Amino acid sequence: MSDQQKIADSPTTDMPNKAENALDMTLEQIQEETRQQAAQQQLVMQQLSGDIEATFEHIQQIKYSGQGKPLVLLHGWGMNSHVWQPLLPSLAQHAQVICIDLPGHGANSHLPLGTLAEAVEQLAPHIPQDAIIMGWSLGGLIAQGLAHALPDRIAALILIASTPKFVAEGDWSHGVSPDLLALFGRSLQTDYLGTVKRFFALQFLSTKTDTRVVNALRDRIMEHPASVPALEDGLNILQTADFSQAPVKQPTLWMLGKLDKLIPASLADALPEMGYKHIAVLEQAAHVPFVTHPELFMEHCGAFLNAL
């Protein structure tokens, strides 16, 4: 893999009331909902693979059949593992894929996310030896935290539309305005569904993704909404996590979108100064390149995984 790749590509590019009801659930209802979600997730994954092992410890995870090293997928803010499903068959050609819903999200919505350190502590027991962590956006920040906490267990990282520091401040210009995150935090208190919907739309902005694809994915994810406390904790992690002075030591592939409205493509110029060698900028992609440009995304991922 070359040291730095900038690839031009061509793009292909309401909410249910259930989320509102979920906010008022009793503990018993949440537990029942979690059991139902687990069954639904198993059914979907069995249709894709036929070789599924689900573990029901503190953090629920779903293992998808595959070859090679374990590849742990960590989704972004307000999302869940459903966002990865179209990509799973391709990833399984290179690795043993493990999907984990972050605490407070999806099938683990009954758990608190907490601070970055607390999220890392919860996830650490579920990271196998020689794991590769694929983290998207918020998941990429948590992946960097795991890499520092588990240096002998994590073999490599793939960080998608993520950054060492999410907020632009001081000498760090490769992030979003703190005001934008503060705005999401305020609107979350008054308009849960609208806030998540706007954030979802922002991730596809400037791409030509079919709106039917975007809406279908959004609705599927919102069948298992994240809890409000977890969303608040996630925003706090985005606001405070800072690895700009602490690059990870493991081999790391950074996948960025030239059109991303959250993570500036200028980050690609700063990463080599931090010692990172593997950087791919997808010219026609935004914040969700694995959805809008899956084939090009897999070209880079496959080459990186095969070289490990």
Image (cartoon, grey):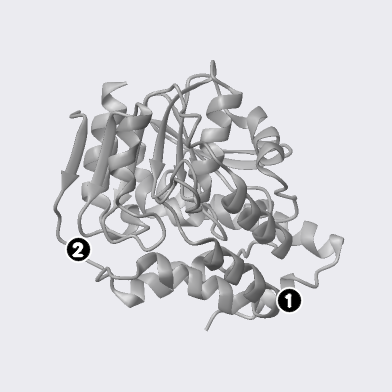
Relative to 37, 156 lies left or right: left
Q: Are marks 2 and 1 in contact (CB under 8 Å)?
A: no
User: Mark 2 belongs to which amino acid?
Assistant: Pro
Task: Characterize the local packing of mark 1: few (<14), some (14-19) or many (20 or more) Cα atoms within 10 angstroms.
Answer: few
Q: Which mark is residue 138?
A: none
Q: Quadrant of the C terminus?
A: top left
Q: Single out the mark in the foreground, 2 or 1.
A: 2
Depth order, front residue of 2/55: 2
Q: Residue at x 29, y 43 (%)?
A: 268
Q: Residue at x 26, y 22 (%)?
A: 307
Q: Is residue 251 visible?
A: yes
Q: Which residue is mark 2?
A: 11
Depth order, front residue of 27/264: 264
Judged from this view, the residue extending furthest toward the bottom is 14
> SS of the residue at dot 1?
helix
- State the CA–CA distance, disc 2 to disc 1: 37 Å
Residue 126 sits above or below residue 33 on the image:
above
Residue 223 sits above or below residue 251 on the image:
below
Q: Earlier in the sequence, mark 2 or mark 1?
A: 2
Residue 301 pos. (x, y %): 29, 37
Q: Which mark is residue 21?
A: 1
Residue 279 pos. (x, y %): 28, 37
